[in-house]
Amino acid sequence: MKDNRLYQPSYLKEILNKFEFTFSKALGQNFLIDGNIIRKIVKESNISKDDTVLEIGPGFGTLTEELALNAKKVIAVEKDSRLMEVLEFTLRDFNNIKIINNDILKENIKNIKEEFSPDRKLKVVANLPYYITTPIIEYLIENKEYIDSITVMVQEEVARRIVATKDNKDYGSLSLYIDYNSDASIIAKAPKNIFMPSPKVDSAVVILKLKNKEFNVDENLLFELIHSGFTKRRKNILNSLTTGFANIEKERLKQVLEELNISSNLRAENLSLNDYINIANKIKYD
Ligand code: SAM
């Protein structure tokens, strides 16, 4: 194995000089310089030699290298075209990595899965660019039929919102959207100093294991209710759920809540995903 492991700051600096590379703030370029966290991300993602991994934003290829050592194949999608020659150099010893120069939000995930991993769903692993964390996670979840799990480094504050449960101050529409689609947990905290350059905030790694099971509910109505509730999060649910996107009559909602034994004095943050599903189903079907 090479001794020039990419995460070593001295090697990173060497590459910066060799390619006269400057970090782009606009592209969220904060590269990892800590071998322990890289190994932990890959281990917790349960990558085996049968897996094809989709990596978003390989940067200099630090995480890509560890992924390639453990997976069958790594497909790495990088938006910054300046990094193409760098990656060709840093990952030259590997024959199981494919780099695609594109914006991940413009990539067709179904095609990637069908071309590179026809028999098995993809595992997504990434140290995400923070300026588009939520759009990327949403895009991946929209493609969940092709994806087994998503392991991503995000800002710590976003990680807390992702895993929050009811009655918690971080609980909101994002928590419910994630809960609806996956089982989520935080697997590691990451202080600012393990990145070069250091970002302004601490980070954390979350893993989302995508759920196969479909809930029996009108999804549009469910998320309209949730968004209404959290847009007016200080009001009680009788007021917040009837003044927002869902547009439900107060008398009707009052009756539904009574039938479900849910107090109308609660706020959006006091209801679980199941509560929202029950409310949506009663409105729709009873
Ligand atoms: N994986 C590397 C590491 O951990 O050292 C770099 C991570 S850095 C936080 C984010 C990477 O995502 C950068 O390389 C950046 O150029 C790339 N990136 C930014 N926006 C992107 C997009 N829309 N699609 C694909 N890659 C993107």
Image (cartoon, rainbow, N blue to C red):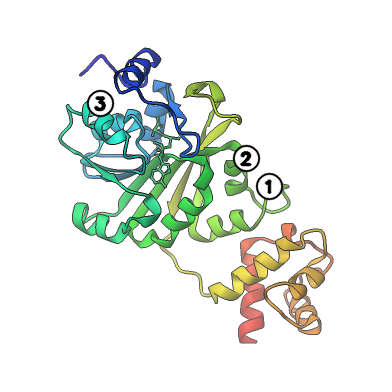
Q: Is residue 283 above or below residue 126?
A: below
Mark whose residue sits in front, 3 or 2: 3
Lower position in the chain sequence, tag 1 or tag 3: 3
The dot on residue 90 is 3
Q: Secondary structure at mark 3?
A: helix
Q: Residues within 10 Å of mark 3 (few under 14, many from 20)?
A: some
Q: CB under 8 Å between callouts 1 and 2?
A: yes
Lower position in the chain sequence, tag 1 or tag 2: 2
Lower position in the chain sequence, tag 3 or tag 2: 3
Q: Is residue 274 above or below residue 2?
A: below
User: Residue 276 falls in which quadrant of the image?
Assistant: bottom right
Residue at x 22% of width, y 17% of height: 2
Q: Where does the image place residue 280, in percent across and percent down from the top left?
A: 63, 76
Mark 1–mark 2 distance (CA, rounded to whole Å): 8 Å
The quadrant where ligand 1 appears is top left
Residue farthest to the bottom? Answer: 286
Q: Where does the image place residue 82, in percent across and percent down from the top left?
A: 32, 35
Mark 3–mark 2 distance (CA, rounded to whole Å): 32 Å
Q: Amino acid at mark 2?
A: Glu
Residue at x 61% of width, y 78% of height: 281
Q: Where does the image place residue 52, in percent across and percent down from the top left?
A: 25, 46
- Residue position marked by numbered label 2 in the rendering: 157
- Residue position marked by numbered label 1 in the rendering: 170
Q: Residues within 10 Å of mark 1 (few under 14, many from 20)?
A: some
Q: Is residue 6 above or below residue 145?
A: above
